């Protein structure tokens, strides 16, 4: 029975030493990928598929989700003028819903990529395994020996629950922020709750206080909140080949992320904001997908060769064996 061991969690606040190590590892991995022609070839193949798919996916998302709300707002305004009724309540409701959808969509910049990964996972696995072959051929061979197990329904269920919860939170926050007297507290409280696990309550409280004292900083605070949520999704997308071959369930993936949180955040941050850039974002995502192979080799034990009936047991608090 194989056991996957990972680093014990370092606590609720990011470890700055591990964070800087993750950042340095990401830069090292990018340089390594640029020096190997096989990785470059797989990179180009994945980029062509990704660019085309991202355009289609984003167009569909906005056409099916955002555009209908804009149409409803126009219809509401026209009907209010024609029939001379007070449309204040309905307008506020539509605006709150539109704001919630906009915030929700902005926390999912990689949703289009997720759809493409689901449809054509082999294109992205190619660049990952090309990099892994160059770094540690034995690790790559051992991981390949494990049959891919998508756990599709479990993953879809978990994603639906996570996205629904996030959307409802965004909607509730958008509506509550319009409440008299206490509405202004919604964003600061949300900021403190989410950021505290990364920077601790004193720093999170200071950032939230700045958003209250200086209204111009409210946009920056919202940007930080959305980025933290999106980076969590980014980490899952990057690690998908590893998780798929080992049959990791969603909760086990969360355990891995939390156990390696400080280094992962540093590693991801080196690519995350570049991925958000229009047109060039997909290229940085594919580079990050290749680079994460180096992270896995450095931070996880090499899996044993697959044998019939073998399964992985996740032990999130056992120390990792030294490489």
Image (cartoon, rainbow, N blue to C red):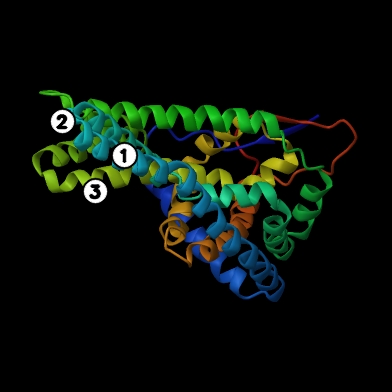
Q: Residues within 10 Å of mark 3 (few under 14, many from 20)?
A: few
Q: CA distance from mark 2 to mark 3?
A: 15 Å
Q: Residue at x 53, y 62 (%)?
A: 282
Q: Are marks 2 and 3 in contact (CB under 8 Å)?
A: no
Q: CA distance from mark 1 to mark 2?
A: 30 Å
Compare marks 2 and 3 and give the one earlier in the sequence.
2
Which type of secondary structure does the marked residue at label 2 adopt? Answer: helix
Report which residue position mark 1 lands on: 75
Residue farthest to the right?
308
Is residue 46 rendered to the left or right of residue 270? right
Report which residue position mark 2 lands on: 184
Which type of secondary structure does the marked residue at label 3 adopt? Answer: helix
Q: Residue at x 19, y 37 (%)?
A: 81
Eye-nearest disc, 1 or 2: 1
Is residue 222 rendered to the left or right of residue 260? left
Res. 317 in view: no
Picture mark count: 3
Q: Are marks 3 and 1 in contact (CB under 8 Å)?
A: no
Q: Residue at x 67, y 57 (%)?
A: 124
Quarter of the image for residue 159 reads top right
Report which residue position mark 3 lands on: 220
How far from the left and from the top, in percent, is residue 238? 58, 50
């Amino acid at each position: 029975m194989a056991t996957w061991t990972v680093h014990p969690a370092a606590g609720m606040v990011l470890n700055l030493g591990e964070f800087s190590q993750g950042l340095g590892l990401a830069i090292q991995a990018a340089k390594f990928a640029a020096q190997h022609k096989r990785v470059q070839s797989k990179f180009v193949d994945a980029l062509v598929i990704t660019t085309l798919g991202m355009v289609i996916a984003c167009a569909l998302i906005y056409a099916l989700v955002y555009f209908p709300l804009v149409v409803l707002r126009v219809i509401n305004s026209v009907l209010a003028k024609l029939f001379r009724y007070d449309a204040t309540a309905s307008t506020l409701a539509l605006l709150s819903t539109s704001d919630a959808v906009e915030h929700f969509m902005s926390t999912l910049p990689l949703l289009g990529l997720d759809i493409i990964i689901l449809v054509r996972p082999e294109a992205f696995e190619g660049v990952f395994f090309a990099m892994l072959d160059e770094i540690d051929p034995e690790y790559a061979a051992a991981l390949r020996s494990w049959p891919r197990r998508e756990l599709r329904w479990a993953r879809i269920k978990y994603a639906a629950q996570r996205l629904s919860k996030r959307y409802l939170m965004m909607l509730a926050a958008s509506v509550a922020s319009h409440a008299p007297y206490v509405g202004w507290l919604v964003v600061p409280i949300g900021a403190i709750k989410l950021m505290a696990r990364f920077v601790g309550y004193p720093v999170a409280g200071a950032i939230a206080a700045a958003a209250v004292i200086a209204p111009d900083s409210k946009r920056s605070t919202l940007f930080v909140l959305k980025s933290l949520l999106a980076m969590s999704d980014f980490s899952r997308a990057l690690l998908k080949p590893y998780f798929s071959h080992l049959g990791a369930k969603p909760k086990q993936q969360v355990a891995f992320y939390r156990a390696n949180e400080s280094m992962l955040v540093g590693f991801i941050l080196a690519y995350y904001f570049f991925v958000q850039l229009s047109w060039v974002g997909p290229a940085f995502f594919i580079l990050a997908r290749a680079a994460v192979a180096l992270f896995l080799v450095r931070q996880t034990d090499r899996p044993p060769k697959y044998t019939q009936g073998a399964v992985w047991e996740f032990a999130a608090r056992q120390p990792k064996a030294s490489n």
